[in-house]
Image (tube, rainbow, N blue to C red):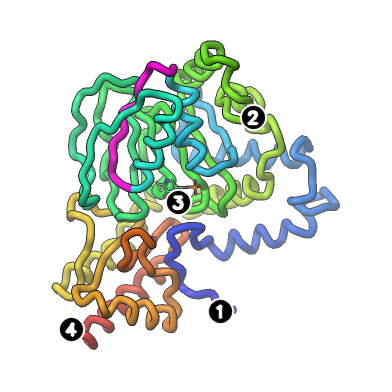
Amino acid sequence: MSRSHNFSAGPATLPLQVIEELQAALPEFKSCQAGIMEISHRSPDFDAVINSAKERFRRLINIPQDYEVLFLQGGASLQFYMLPLNILSPSEKGAYIMTGTWSTKALKEAKRCSESFALWEDSSHKNVPKTISKTNSTYIHYTSNNTIYGTQFLDTPQTDSHLVVDMSSDICSRPVDVSDFDIIYAGAQKNLGPSGVTTIILSPWAIEQSRKNDKERAGGIPSMLNYALMVSKNSMFNTPNTFGIFALERMLAWMEAEGGMESMEQKNKEKARLIYQELDSSEFWVPHASVDSRSLMNITWRIHDTQLESIFLERATKEGLLALKGHRSVGGIRASLYNSCSLESAQKLSEFMKEFRLQNQ
Ligand SMILES: *Cc1c(COP(=O)(O)O)cnc(C)c1O
């Protein structure tokens, strides 16, 4: 076996144990006499899978009883449109905190069906706001972790407004109070499993808005984009991504067995500390994010002598440290340290960085 230390930003590394459980379910699942990908989504065996995924998710991050959970397709990118379509009437506004590429895309889609606007902007993308100003909007939308720039909200923004969040790249990485939010959405492929499933958590208010707007919008909300309808169908208005939901269920079981959110947070802090410590040790490195906005999930930096970056990346790959190239829009180096990335991987990376610095500075 030659699996490397994988720092991919997404789809991200998965625990080997989970991969082996998925592998075992492919030819034959339980007493189905068929594999997990080959059974009906209307079967009792699959019902047990999706319901177990929901229960584990509820337990793991303590989702309030009266909130609903959906497992849909289309990625976080579909939520950029689906969310405002369900929540806002055409004359209502969502306020968007603009902290990077994903917020920009979210607002662009929201403007297709609403009067939404940008609330806070900083073109350096090194910071996230510390406070949020009062605003005349139905909700405030933000991106809790900026996957491309490597910044993160350390705390949930305090606001009187309804709060909705794209948590794609830090969901389940630390404890959060779900009742602070009306909608949480996240693609699975960073912290929760393979791509192809989007998790969505809805408050009673969010579901009520969806019902109301379905009545008020001309022609109603298209079925496949209708939160309230999907809730009433247990995410199975049409065929869901059955394998993806099974993988999600196994990932949630793994996180529970690892000790849940407190333990994930502790491990994530330790991994990030190892890398930031090396980055702060010398001018050789140029970390991107301001210290008080640093992400624990995606760490981004340049090398002072940028010509060394391609050599760094090439040598890292040779040493079995994969996928450290920064996003194509910003360049440089990025290490993604999601839940499934082990402490050992972070240790190996920090050792390699130190060695590279000492050889080249
Ligand atoms: C990856 C990512 C997305 C895009 O997710 P898709 O599932 O590819 O649509 C959106 N927002 C954030 C914060 C991300 O990290």
- Callout 2 secondary element: loop
Q: Amino acid at mark 2?
A: Asn
Cβ atoms at labels 2 and 3 below 8 Å apart: no
Magenta stretch contains residue 91: yes
- Callout 4 secondary element: loop
Q: Nearer the viewer, mark 4 or mark 2?
A: 4
* Residue at the (66%, 44%) spot, across then down: 241
How far separated are the C-alphas under marks 1 and 4?
31 Å
Residue 259's disc is: 3
Q: Residue furthest right?
A: 33
Question: What residue did someone put label 4 on?
Answer: 361
How far across and how far down the image is residue 161, in percent? 30, 22
Q: Nearer the viewer, residue 146 or 70?
A: 146
Q: Residues within 10 Å of mark 2 (few under 14, many from 20)?
A: some
Cβ atoms at labels 1 and 2 below 8 Å apart: no
Sequence-wise, the earlier of marks 2 and 3 is 2
Q: Nearer the viewer, mark 3 or mark 4?
A: 4
Is 89 placed above or below 16 here? above
* Residue stretch in magenta: 89-100
Q: Residues within 10 Å of mark 3 (few under 14, many from 20)?
A: few
On screen, residue 32 versus residue 160, left or right, reads right
* Residue at the (26%, 65%) spot, across then down: 301
Sequence-wise, the earlier of marks 1 and 4 is 1
Residue 234's disc is: 2
Q: Amino acid at mark 3?
A: Gly
Cβ atoms at labels 1 and 4 below 8 Å apart: no
How far separated are the C-alphas under marks 1 and 2?
40 Å
Sequence-wise, the earlier of marks 1 and 2 is 1
